[in-house]
Image (tube, rainbow, N blue to C red):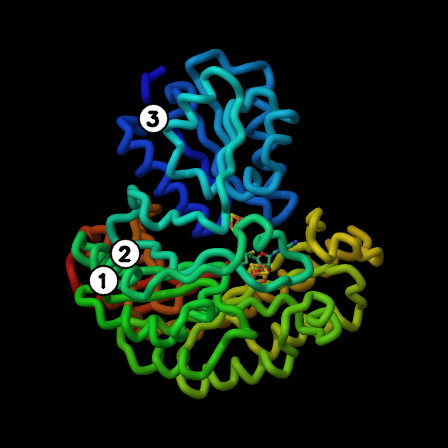
Amino acid sequence: MIPNSYIIHTFGCQMNKHDSEHIAGVLEDSGYSRAPTDEEAEIIIMNTCSVRKSAEDKVWGRLSCFAGGVPPPKIVAVGGCMAQLLGESIIDRSPGVRLVFGIGSMDRLPGLIEKSRENPVCDLGDINKAFVDCLPYIPESPVSAWVPVNHGCDNSCSYCIVPAARGNARSRDLDDILREVEKAAGSGRIEVILLGQNVNAYGKDLFPRVRFSQLLDAVSGVQGIQRIKFETSHPADMDESIIEVMAGRANLCEYLHLPAQSGSNRVLKAMNRGYTREDYLEEVRFSRKIIPEISLSTDIIVGFPGETDQDFRDTFTLLEEVRFSNAFIFKYSRRDGTAAAAMRNEVPTRVVSNRFMLLSELQDKITSEALRELEGKTVEVLVGGSAKRGGFRKGRARGNQVVLLSSAQELVEGTLVMARVTGTGKHTARGEVVETITKA
Ligand code: SAH
Ligand code: SF4
Ligand code: F3S
């Protein structure tokens, strides 16, 4: 074991991954260093997710490895959304855990570790006062930076546990965000991904109000940032100015992740989503009118309580109509503490599985057809960091499509290239580099 070393396992969304960067930053500022394996680490940290039961089960599975006890000075600590929601009960269920910390107590992590050497500790801090953004962080990527614009969520989608875990919506100050983006650019990052549970609700809680489109406009003016993406947008908070700003700025990518969740108005209402199928389709139509090449992706939940065959057909036809370049399809997972958890009319597992399969098959077909439309075209690709596979280097096009690149020259992570798409598969395109725009 390496003294004063840590390892972090991250289970959640991009915000959760960015929190892990902060955890690393806070620990390294206190003299800890990263360990390569659990065996070598003194502090093992699980940064957890609660969005679906399957996400929690992965963590419980991992924790069960420590059920036989963890000899000091080794410490197993649990943070993130599960910690925020379940608190002390994690220690009761999993006695190998010494420390449960919250998003609101991440800043005090080194002290909490010391305290937990004596007795198990649960300290979550106050989620609504958590200002994670001012903490140091160790970025994962030398090319791309995650920049949160708001935290928490003021909606109450009836299935969703995220607001309970992450608290009320809190927007960051526009100048703070700009300063962070400038810093990222100054350290060589050319891409920023703006993060929030509901990014386009940005500024609703600021006085005077700032619109998300104004923020996008300001961020797009930062020197050196060649690509900007943002996640996740909520259909009820979309406004035309967002699409108009995207159309007018070269560094705002033609990509919009807009979770529809369902194509049935009845289900959307039961989900408390605040828009109709027709509203959603109108947003899609407007986006494509202003940015014809825009790539749209979505999240769908199948098997929400009470979902009938007709409701499901409405979701099926929504995917057929919109033809998303990608859709993340989830089986409904009952989360204690949400409004939907009290709904009695659960859809039988077998029916949910069948709907999930039908929808996934449909979307796989659409995804590959949408990719095929890229064939013969020349697209801009940002070369990623993952290792070469079968002679190819992985990158992402502006519409977020994965492009496997072949090139006569060695491609360095962070290089921006123009590539001609020579072939496509189920989920990826293949491309040949025709021109290097910027070298990393
Ligand atoms: N606004 C957040 C939502 C996080 S959850 C964001 O940043 O994306 C991501 C997706 O998980 C949601 O869009 C939804 O499709 C899915 N999801 C949320 N709660 C769920 C549940 N209880 N069961 C199944 N899927 C769920
Ligand atoms: Fe959940 Fe809805 Fe908030 Fe997203 S916008 S986190 S789905 S409540
Ligand atoms: Fe999961 Fe929390 Fe993100 S529940 S999806 S880690 S906000």
In this rendering, position of residue 439 left or right of residue 167 = left
Residue 87, located in which quarter of the rendered image? top right
Q: Residue at x 35, y 27 (%)?
A: 36
Spot the residue most to the front.
207
Residue 416 numbered mark, or none: 1
In this rendering, position of residue 179 left or right of residue 231 = left
> Hey, what amino acid is under mark 2?
Val
* Tag 2 secondary structure: strand
Residue 105 numbered mark, or none: none
The alpha-carbon separation of the residues under discs 1 and 2 comes to 6 Å
Q: What residue is shown with label 2?
A: 383
Q: Residue at x 48, y 28 (%)?
A: 77
Q: Is residue 47 visible?
A: yes
The alpha-carbon separation of the residues under discs 3 and 2 comes to 27 Å
Most foreground residue, 170 or 60: 170
Q: What residue is shown with label 3?
A: 35
Name the quarter where the N terminus is drawn. Answer: top left
Residue 149 in the image: state x and y as whole percent. 38, 61
Q: Marks 2 and 1: in contact by CB < 8 Å?
A: yes
Considering only order in the chain, which callout, 2 or 3, is on the residue closer to the N terminus? 3
Callout 3 environment at 10 Å: few (<14), some (14 to 19), or many (20+)?
A: many
- Give the answer, above or below, for where 333 lies relative to 119: below
Residue 244, located in which quarter of the rendered image? bottom left
Q: Residue at x 29, y 73 (%)?
A: 378
Tell me how many marks there are.
Answer: 3
Considering only order in the chain, which callout, 2 or 1, is on the residue closer to the N terminus? 2
> Hey, what amino acid is under mark 1?
Leu
- Give the answer, above or below, for where 202 lies relative to 351: below
